[in-house]
Amino acid sequence: MTSGAPAQRPAGLPSAEQVSELLDSEFARAGYEVEAVTVDARRRPAHITVVADGDVPLDLDSIAELSRLASERLDALDTGEAAYVLEVTSPGVERPLTAEKHFRRARGRKVQMRLADGSALTGRIAAARDGTIDLVVPQARGWGLRTVSLAEVGNAVVQVEFSPPKPPELELLDRTEDQR
């Protein structure tokens, strides 16, 4: 997904699409993908923001490596006098989970869903595969698994947690991991 800069992009400044094409293969070799690129030419200097994601969570070392790769590739472009600031970042917790890979990458995280029928569901993501999401959910007697079709999910977001999950919840999550 890319979003471009205003039509009056300074000469030499690459478009969001160009940045994405330039970085896709480099990021893929590092185990990540370019989720989005924004080129904001209204700021001085212009800002190029690259959002990366992967099955292995981004940490500071990964961000630094991807930033170095992106900087090398962009520095090789002839940008003339166009100055810019490069930022490589992760999607952040506020990003809606819309694709199976988003749910898979958020395994173990608590998620709040609004289902297509209007009902709400909160659970911890145990697995995402074959168009379904397995959630560890509270039940009358402890914890259980609930499988939801991705097609049933109207919207979903990761919940910020301030306390650790309960041990029985984690045990069920671990058993689910062993079954995959």
Image: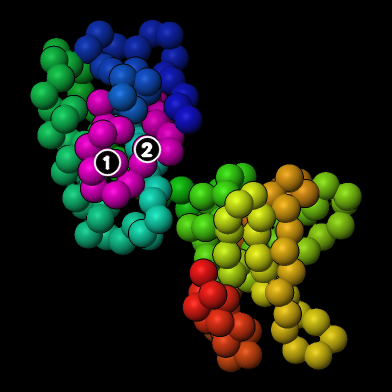
Is residue 110 shown left or right of residue 23? right
Relative to 16, residue 120 above or below: below
**Magenta range:** 22-41
Percent across and percent down for residue 104 are 52, 58
Residue 126 placement: quadrant: bottom right
On whether residue 152 falls in the magenta region, the answer is no
Residue drawn at (58%, 56%), measured in percent from left and top? Answer: 129
Percent across and percent down for residue 52 are 37, 44
- SS at badge 2: strand
Q: Residue extending furthest front?
A: 179
Is residue 2 shown left or right of residue 74? right
Q: Is residue 119 visible?
A: yes
Tell whether label 1 touches label 2 (CB within 8 Å): yes
Residue 34 image label = 2
- SS at badge 1: helix
Percent across and percent down for residue 122 are 73, 67
Mark 1 nearby-residue class (10 Å; few <14, some 14–19, many ≥20): many
Instruction: Mark 2 or mark 1: name the one nearer the start of the chain.
Output: 1
Pointer 1 residue: 27
User: Label 2 sits on what residue type?
Assistant: Val
Residue drawn at (78%, 54%), measured in percent from left and top? Answer: 114
Mark 2 nearby-residue class (10 Å; few <14, some 14–19, many ≥20): many
Relative to 143, residue 18 above or below: above
Percent across and percent down for residue 93 are 53, 56
Residue 9 placement: quadrant: top left
User: Label 1 sits on what residue type?
Assistant: Phe
Residue drawn at (26%, 17%), measured in percent from left and top? Answer: 13
Is residue 25 shown left or right of residue 129? left
